[in-house]
């Protein structure tokens, strides 16, 4: 239930909490990572399965997700709508935690 509450927090709360959620991926508690996934759910769905031309996050390998998210973060992907801007708001440990989270989602 706590996970659902964190997923529903508004983006403003995520932006407020963002700096305090920094640290290595291993240090981020699941509750903190679930807050980070809130903006992902807006397009990729609450379970990360994607829809209507939006690719799924769930079930991809952690290394593949990490590489894609870092490419967005570094502005290396052209012709995207919002991902490059969204990923700029995350630091590397947060990106690594997101990749781990969605890769593990496929195994649950």
Image: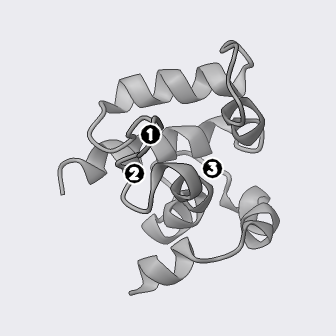
Q: Which mark is residue 48?
A: 2
**Helix, strand or loop at mark 3:** loop
Q: Earlier in the sequence, mark 2 or mark 3?
A: 3
Of tags 2 and 3, which is closer to the observer?
2
Q: Within 10 Å of the Cα at label 2, are there few (<14), some (14-19), or many (20+) other Cα atoms?
A: many
Q: Within 10 Å of the Cα at label 3, are there few (<14), some (14-19), or many (20+) other Cα atoms?
A: some
Q: Please report the residue visible at 30 percent of the width from the left and 30 percent of the height from the top.
A: 61
Q: CA distance from mark 3 to mark 1?
A: 15 Å
Q: Please report the residue visible at 52 percent of the width from the left and 83 percent of the height from the top.
A: 5
Q: Earlier in the sequence, mark 3 or mark 1?
A: 3
- Measured as percent of width and height from the top left, residue 102 is found at 37, 47
Toward the left, the furthest residue is 107
Q: Please report the residue visible at 32 percent of the width from the left and 42 percent of the height from the top.
A: 103
Q: Say whether marks 2 and 3 touch (CB < 8 Å).
A: no
Question: Could you tell whether 57 is left or right of 34 in the image?
Answer: left
- Which quadrant is the C terminus positioned in? bottom left
Question: Could you tell whether 24 is left or right of 2 in the image?
Answer: right
Q: Nearer the viewer, residue 16 or 41?
A: 41
Residue that carries the numbered disc 1 in the rendered image: 99
Residue that carries the numbered disc 3 in the rendered image: 23
Q: Nearer the viewer, residue 81 or 90?
A: 81
Q: Quick check: 94 above or below 87?
A: below
- Measured as percent of width and height from the top left, residue 33 is found at 51, 60
Q: Quick check: 39 above or below 30?
A: above
Q: Please report the residue visible at 72 percent of the width from the left and 30 percent of the height from the top.
A: 84
- Measured as percent of width and height from the top left, residue 37 is found at 53, 57
Q: Nearer the viewer, residue 35 or 30?
A: 35
Of tags 3 and 1, which is closer to the observer?
1
């Amino acid at each position: 239930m706590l996970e659902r509450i964190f997923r529903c927090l508004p983006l403003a709360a995520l932006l407020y909490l963002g700096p305090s959620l920094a640290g290595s991926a291993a240090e981020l508690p699941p509750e903190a990572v679930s807050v980070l996934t809130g903006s992902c759910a807006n397009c990729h769905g609450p379970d990360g399965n994607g829809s209507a031309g939006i690719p799924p996050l769930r079930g991809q390998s952690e290394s593949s997700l990490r590489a894609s998210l870092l490419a967005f973060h570094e502005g290396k992907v052209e012709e995207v709508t919002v991902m490059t801007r969204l990923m700029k708001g995350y630091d590397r440990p947060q990106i690594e935690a997101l990749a781990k989270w969605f890769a593990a989602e496929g195994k649950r």
